[in-house]
Amino acid sequence: MLDIRRLLEKSERLQWSVDDIDFTAPGADLVRDEQLGELAPFMSDLYWIERVAAVVFDAMRSRETDPVRRAIFASFAADEARHAEAERRLMVRWGMLGRRQRPQPNPSVAKLLHVLERDAHRIHPSVFAAIIPMTELVLDGALVKFLTRVVDDPVCDQVFEHVNADEARHIAMDFYMLEHYGHSYSAMTNTFELVRSIARPQGMYALLFGYFPTLTRSRASLDRLGIDLEDVTAAMKRYTGLGQRNPDIARHPAYRLMSGYIDLVTGNDRIGSALVRISDVMDGFRGGPIAA
Ligand SMILES: [Fe+2]
Ligand SMILES: [Fe+2]
């Protein structure tokens, strides 16, 4: 069992600042010109996923009654905001953005962020507890690993060394929370509150029309970059494996929804692409990407 007091102590002790990294150090030119065009949308997705993660961890903090867990989530929200800023500064370093510019979000992530900023505190934390580990496993196990492999810039390595150290703590806590909610909801006969929070239109909207397409768009951009999608699949399988080993997790309703979705999309891109198309159609109906 994870010792969450120790995790909190570590989370606070290991905070770092983007200013610890010298973004003017030599090596920016090691990113080849032909890489830049493909890396830009990838980095932009990464930046916005971190921003989403910061909002989600802040929502977890606001709904948490346990003071230790609350402080851990506060530190995680700070971590994610810092990751976004460090990635933005890499983009500036590589000439993808002006010094004070932020990347343009793709329509899916713009919509997701818009919905979450308004409604995240109304979505039951156990729903997030099911979604977060999957995102972080994919980020950690595939996207970031890939980025550090293809980019030769030493400053990029330095950034992701810091990011990975934070993410290791996040994943430990993600599994802990998933088990926690899996256990408490398995023990409950009435999952009314959970079902209601998933079924609430804006919650569902955020999940289906925001989060899922964001992932599949990232998959498409990874494909263009030439990443082996095996890593992504392996990370997703790690997620579905959690429930195979732990019956409490397996009964968690939002986890079941997510793993069911993963079973559908792994090795089959059609479902995810269909969701991207649905979200584009919804944009058309709703008169713009962020009108929910
Ligand atoms: Fe992060
Ligand atoms: Fe994280």
Image: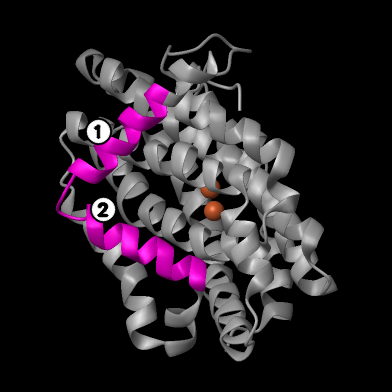
The quadrant of the picture occupied by the N terminus is bottom right
Identity of the residue furthest to the top in this view: 98
The mark total stands at 2
Dominant SS in magenta: helix
Colouring mode (rainbow / by chain / secondary structure / one colour):
one colour
Please tell me whether residue 245 belongs to the stretch shown in magenta.
no
Report which residue position mark 2 lands on: 232
Q: Position of residue 34 (x, y in %)?
A: 20, 15
Residue at point 43%, 31% (across, down): 45
Label placed on residue 220: 1
Is 19 in front, or is 98? 98
Q: Position of residue 120 (x, y in %)?
A: 69, 47
Q: Which residues are magenta?
A: 253-281
Say left or right for 64 vs 275: right
Q: Position of residue 40 (x, y in %)?
A: 36, 21
Residue at point 63%, 67% (across, down): 194
Whether residue 16 is visible here, answered yes or no, is no
The residue type indicated by label 1 comes to Ala
